[in-house]
Amino acid sequence: MSTTTEIIRTLHFASLFLMMGGLGAVMVALWRGWRETDFDRQLLAFEDASTGHKLLLLPGTIAVGATGVFLAADGEFNFFTTGWLLALEISYLAILFACIPILGHALNRVQIESLKSKKQKKSTEALQGLLDDNVPIVICLIILFLIPVMIWLPEFKPF
């Protein structure tokens, strides 16, 4: 194995840690927000989730894709005719272009409504509806359940 391959594998491994750290940061903050009874602490938890999304999950996911493409190219795999690699690409793109933006949008809506409620100095119905909504945690769970599939595909190369 060449030095370039080792560097790419190390970067890929590091970016996987960044992505998983971001997913964990978002999920823990969301669970904390839903279990909290104090309104201000609930908003703080959602703000923490938004920060984890922007600082860890999104950059980590992009880095995983970039380093994964370099690893596949270095291994001389065809991106379209190798079945397991195509399935891996599709599941990755579903996370990158569907799950991550929906999660970010949901968290941004909570931030915007919390700013509106702070300006009015009372909780709005829209904010309470967003805090009761479970879309962000469902999206996180979809990502979480796709991760083992994405690990299984290159390890066992089923097709």
Image (cartoon, rainbow, N blue to C red):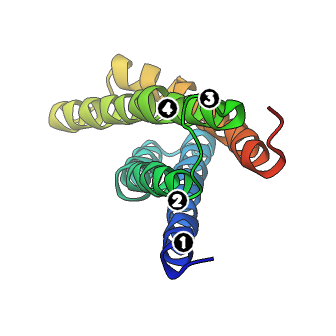
What residue would you read off at disc 3? 81
Label 4 to label 3: alpha-carbon separation: 17 Å
**CB atoms of marks 1 and 2 within 8 Å:** yes
Q: Which mark is residue 74?
A: 2
Q: Which mark is residue 5?
A: 1
Circle 4 packing at 10 Å, graded few (<14), some (14-19), many (20+), is: some
Label 1 to label 2: alpha-carbon separation: 7 Å
Question: For the residue marked with disc 4, what is the amino acid?
Answer: Leu
**CB atoms of marks 2 and 3 within 8 Å:** no
Q: In front here: 44 or 30? A: 30
Residue 139, above or below 150 = above
Residue drawn at x 31%, y 35% is 108
How far across and how far down the image is residue 66, in percent? 42, 52
Circle 2 packing at 10 Å, graded few (<14), some (14-19), many (20+), is: few
Residue drawn at x 59%, y 56% is 75
Question: For the residue marked with disc 2, what is the amino acid?
Answer: Asp
What residue would you read off at disc 4? 93
Nearer the observer: mark 2 or 4; the answer is: 2
If you read the primary sequence from the N terminus, does the residue marked by circle 2 or circle 3 appear first? 2
- Quadrant where the C terminus is found in the figure: top right
Residue drawn at x 37%, y 25% is 127
Nearer the observer: mark 1 or 4; the answer is: 1
Label 2 to label 4: alpha-carbon separation: 20 Å
Residue 90, image quadrant: top right
Residue 121, image quadrant: top left
Question: For the residue marked with disc 3, what is the amino acid?
Answer: Thr
Label 3 to label 1: alpha-carbon separation: 22 Å
How far across and how far down the image is residue 14, in percent? 53, 70
Q: In front here: 10 or 127? A: 10
**CB atoms of marks 4 and 3 within 8 Å:** no
If you read the primary sequence from the N terminus, does the residue marked by circle 3 or circle 1 appear first? 1
